């Protein structure tokens, strides 16, 4: 099973992002789809492009049921790995060779809206819209028009814990509720002492014991890393900072955001309660993999990793709330839609498939596998029932999703902006560039690439 989750590489990007300017022509399975024939009654094939293997299986089951109810339409799923999903989509859409329907992430939405590449989700869907997560509808609405059918939603970020490692450190799951962090530490910081206690060096010394050698790690307390969705966006938000303002300008070098980044970088390089950035900067799965191997006690992530943890953990585990900062526990909440190709050769059939995907009957297959939380509200009980049958309570994610949130990054040139800030962020997390100086440099580069 691929480790990348339904909402993408931490939904936004922890690997290199492709700039999303629509460009040159390319090939796509959509080119080979069959066309309807009135005289022969031939089947119409609608292709749906996805980036996650686990969710693909749920969609295949959903579309099998759809075809039973609509024998004249066959739906084929096309898996394109996240690593080259956006490059290939840009090329295929630019060359009029894209699939009829494709998964869309809000960070990359705007260029496709601007170029007229997407079907508007208009009045034909009015009967369904009230059953879609409102935040997802808002996230993908531009100038009063909705550009996709909500499919998956995160809720919010929480903390997976390894019960065995907690027990060995004398830490109870109850102690993880209500943890707080504070810029610069001090008495208001209850998170750092717990993380030190949960960190162990090769000689068996814990992070809060004399003689601890963090350069020789055996076990880390926490998963701090250059992980936008799982880690640093939440720290920025919970310190009252912003990453991007309402005009789309990147503003992550503010004092509030700088203090949040400094705290994370100190967890890695000063206190050594999290893995070195040399392991995590270019491997978004490192902390998850180390958690599953029993080498990280607290893994901060989203519902998108719930099935990965359930399938991979060979130890007792649970889910605790997100640590709160000075402004509370502020999480990024993100959803994913499926967009219709405005140049589909089968527009009527494509619309019918989109309506199925936006219905409780169509979306329940996603929830019933536990792969992701449906953004179709009436399909969410299937998700909860799946995890209840596994004796897992995922309610922390939904609870966090109801609290204050920081909006997901977006923009016409988001991919180019990411590529512009990433090299400097690498140096910041490695401890080679001072946080304040590096953020100013990265912000300037991101805004230049973003045209703002």
Image: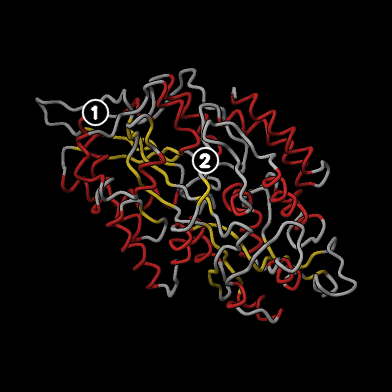
Which residue is under mark 1?
347
**Secondary element type, mark 1:** helix
Q: Mark 2 Cα within 10 Å, few/some/many (few <14, many 20+)?
A: many
Residue at 71% in and 49% down: 261
**Secondary element type, mark 2:** helix
Q: Alpha-carbon distance for marks 2 and 1?
A: 26 Å
Depicted 206 relative to depicted 123: above or below: below
Percent x, y of residue 63: 27, 47
Which badge, 2 or 1, is on the more N-terminal residue?
A: 2
Q: On the rendered structure, is 48 left or right of 188? A: left
Q: Which color scheme does this rendered protein use?
A: secondary structure
Depicted 269 relative to depicted 92: above or below: below
Percent x, y of residue 363: 30, 52
* C-beta proximity under 8 Å, tags 2 and 1: no
Depicted 288 relative to depicted 177: above or below: above
Q: Mark 1 Cα within 10 Å, few/some/many (few <14, many 20+)?
A: some
**Numbered circles on residues, count:** 2
| Label drawn at residue 126 | none
- Assign the C terminus to one quadrant of the image: top right
**Front residue of this view, candidates 294 and 141:** 141
Which residue is under mark 2?
82
Residue at 38% in and 23% down: 97
């Amino acid at each position: 099973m691929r480790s990348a989750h339904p909402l993408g590489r931490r939904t936004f990007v922890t690997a290199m992002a492709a700039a999303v300017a629509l460009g040159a022509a390319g090939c796509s399975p959509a080119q080979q789809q069959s066309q309807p024939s009135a005289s022969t009654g031939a089947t119409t094939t609608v292709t749906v492009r996805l980036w996650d293997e686990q969710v693909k299986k749920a969609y295949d089951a959903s579309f099998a049921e759809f075809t039973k109810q609509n024998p004249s339409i066959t739906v084929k799923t096309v898996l394109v790995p996240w690593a080259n999903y956006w490059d290939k989509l840009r090329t295929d859409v630019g060359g009029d060779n894209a699939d009829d329907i494709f998964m869309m992430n809000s960070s990359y939405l705007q260029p496709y809206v601007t170029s007229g590449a997407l079907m508007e989700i208009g009045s034909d869907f009015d009967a369904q819209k009230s059953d879609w997560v409102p935040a997802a509808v808002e996230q993908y609405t531009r100038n009063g028009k909705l550009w996709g059918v909500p499919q998956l939603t995160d809720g919010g970020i929480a903390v997976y814990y390894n019960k065995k490692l907690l027990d060995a450190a004398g830490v109870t799951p109850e102690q993880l509720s209500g943890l707080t962090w504070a810029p610069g530490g001090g008495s208001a910081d209850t998170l750092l002492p717990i993380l030190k206690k949960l960190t162990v060096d090769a000689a068996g010394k814990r992070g809060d014991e004399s003689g601890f050698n963090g350069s020789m790690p055996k076990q880390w307390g926490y998963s701090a890393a250059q992980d936008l969705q799982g880690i640093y966006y939440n720290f920025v938000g919970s310190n009252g900072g912003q990453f991007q303002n309402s005009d789309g300008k990147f503003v992550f070098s503010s004092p509030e955001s700088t203090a949040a980044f400094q705290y994370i970088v100190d967890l890695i390089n000063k206190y050594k309660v999290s893995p070195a950035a040399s392991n995590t900067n270019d491997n978004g799965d490192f902390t998850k993999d180390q958690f599953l191997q029993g080498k990280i006690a607290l893994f901060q992530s989203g519902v998108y990793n719930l099935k990965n943890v359930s399938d991979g953990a060979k130890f007792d585990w649970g889910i605790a709330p997100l640590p709160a900062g000075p402004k509370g526990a502020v999480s990024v909440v993100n959803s994913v839609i499926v967009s219709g190709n405005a140049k589909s050769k089968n527009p009527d059939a494509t619309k019918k498939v989109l309506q199925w995907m936006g219905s409780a009957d169509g979306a329940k297959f996603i929830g019933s596998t536990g792969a992701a939380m449906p953004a179709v509200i009436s399909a969410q009980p299937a998700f909860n029932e799946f995890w209840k049958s596994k004796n897992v309570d995922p309610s922390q994610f939904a609870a966090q999703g109801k609290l204050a949130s920081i909006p997901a990054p977006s923009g016409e040139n988001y991919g180019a902006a990411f590529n512009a800030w990433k090299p400097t962020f690498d140096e910041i997390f490695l401890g080679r560039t001072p946080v304040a100086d590096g953020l100013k440099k990265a912000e300037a580069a991101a805004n230049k690439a973003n045209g703002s």
